[in-house]
Amino acid sequence: MHQTIGVLDFGSQYTQVIARRIRECSVYSRIYHYTTPAAQLKADGVTGLILSGGPSSVLTEGAPMPDPGIYKLKVPVLGICYGLQLIALQLKGKVDPSEKREFGHADLKIVKKDVIFRGMPNTLRVWNSHGDHVTRLPRGFRAIASSDNSPYAAIEDPKRKIYGIQFHPEVNHTEQGLHIIDNYLKRVCGCIGDWSMADFIDQSVASIRETVGDGRVILGLSGGVDSSVAAALIHRAIGRQLTCVFVDNGLLRKDEREYVVDLYKRNFKLDLRVERAGPLFLRKLRGVTNPESKRKIIGRTFVQVFHRSLKAVGHADFLAQGTLYPDVIESVAIADNPAALIKSHHNVGGLPKKMKLKLLEPLRELFKDEVRAVGSALGLPKEVVWRQPFPGPGLGVRVVGNITSRRLRILREADAILQDEMMSSGWYYKVWQSFCVLVPVKTVGVMGDERTYEYVITIRAVESVDAMTADWVRLPYDLLRTISSRIINEVKGANRVCLDISSKPPSTIEWE
């Protein structure tokens, strides 16, 4: 049995990022709702606790509060941002609103470096996001770091092994953030660090078997990394109880259906069915230009097609999906605290009651790079594991505005050229994602002494680690020139190529 760090979730968008950083330190983590009783945590044998941040103020009536018994479990506790303020408030310190809300980078001045700041410089650039601060420490605590806005930016009670930090060590913006978390895990909680993705696979297989029992599972297989790894993981757990359905929604890349069917016939022994539903999707999307409406229509139609495919399968108890954590964080509220909706994802959320299927999402707590690691450990081929992400709504969110067969044809041809050049140049596996977007704007051009009035194609290439943030890729000019020249000369209907040089945030990776 591996040591377990419990993460109490108070509604932060970074809760799963905290859990992910713990996994990076080779320690097993488990997320709990903030109301989880201390007795349950003790029964589960947690080695230590981390209290997440959250959107609430501890000074607000009805603010999320944990069981006070957690401080009597005699296991280390680390509070992050809102978690620090909870510790101060519940242990009879004082928290007040800040005169100036602290959001973004700040300089942290470290005064004690013997435990969680062991091996650090005297000053760190850290990331803050809070409107309250601690103004009086509980008995037994002392300050171990400060910032311009707070004398108690990090505190400790070494006797009870309770620590609090005002900033977010889990985000990439904080210097030495992973080192801080590792110090807490290894130096305070005494974790050995013997957990790996192989353990995740073993735990997931056991969980899937227990959940599914002798039931049957139907899974939407797109051919991308997420659904492929989900299929391989579930197949390892339940074998022939899994049926995969590939939906041709008319929004696929060029020759995608043929590629996926051939790939899985060569590499896997899966029960794979193909549903050709392009006309249905395009009919329902006719005249729809709002991106959120598009996603919802595609999501509903996707579920309808699955419902129809059940008749051919015969019977299923579960609908499996390759949902990842970035999908969840953009789409739904966390715990009892609603997070801001960024965009709907077709494979996130509940199912129509008439389907009578339970949802199975074995990758829901992972990020893309972790999913790739799981895929490699499962023995999936490189062409699957390292395939660039492709959105569930497909080209439906890459044709900006109204979707028509002509616009889809133009985008498919342009994107095929981009992928061909990225692959042949060796850049395909160097970037997170590269694709074309059709902009519903026509511009004047000249071809063969004739005036043209055709669409604009935009190239989007980004680098990222987990899709939570991304930066545009500085592709070589010669490569961009080749791609542009080929698209303009070979794709009928496009006469201009642009390059998207925006980062996430403030822009999202996909245009819609």
Image (spheres, grey):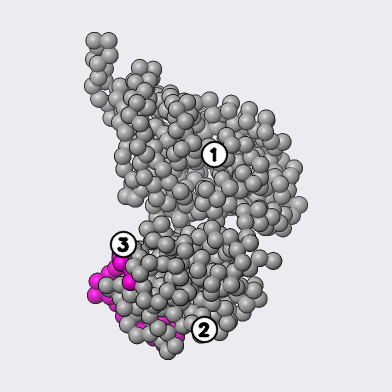
- The residue labelled by disc 3 is 104
- The residue labelled by disc 1 is 386
Q: Is residue 345 left or right of residue 272?
A: left
Q: Position of residue 207 (x, y in %)?
A: 68, 57
Q: Mark 1: which secondary structure?
A: loop
Q: From the viewer's side, name the closer residue of 354 and 403.
A: 403
Image quadrant of residue 171? bottom left
* Residue that extends furthest to the bottom in the rendered view of this protein: 139
Q: Position of residue 160 (x, y in %)?
A: 52, 83
Q: Earlier in the sequence, mark 3 or mark 1?
A: 3
Q: Is residue 345 left or right of residue 244?
A: left
Q: Which residues are magenta?
A: 85-109
Q: What residue type is disc 1 on?
A: Trp
Please name the residue shown 57% across and 34% down the image: 383
Q: Earlier in the sequence, mark 3 or mark 2?
A: 3
Would you say the magenta stretch is mainly helix, strand or loop? strand
For the N terminus, the image quarter is: bottom right
Q: Is residue 35 left or right of residue 117?
A: right
Please name the residue shown 67% across and 47% down the image: 234
Residue 160: numbered disc: 2
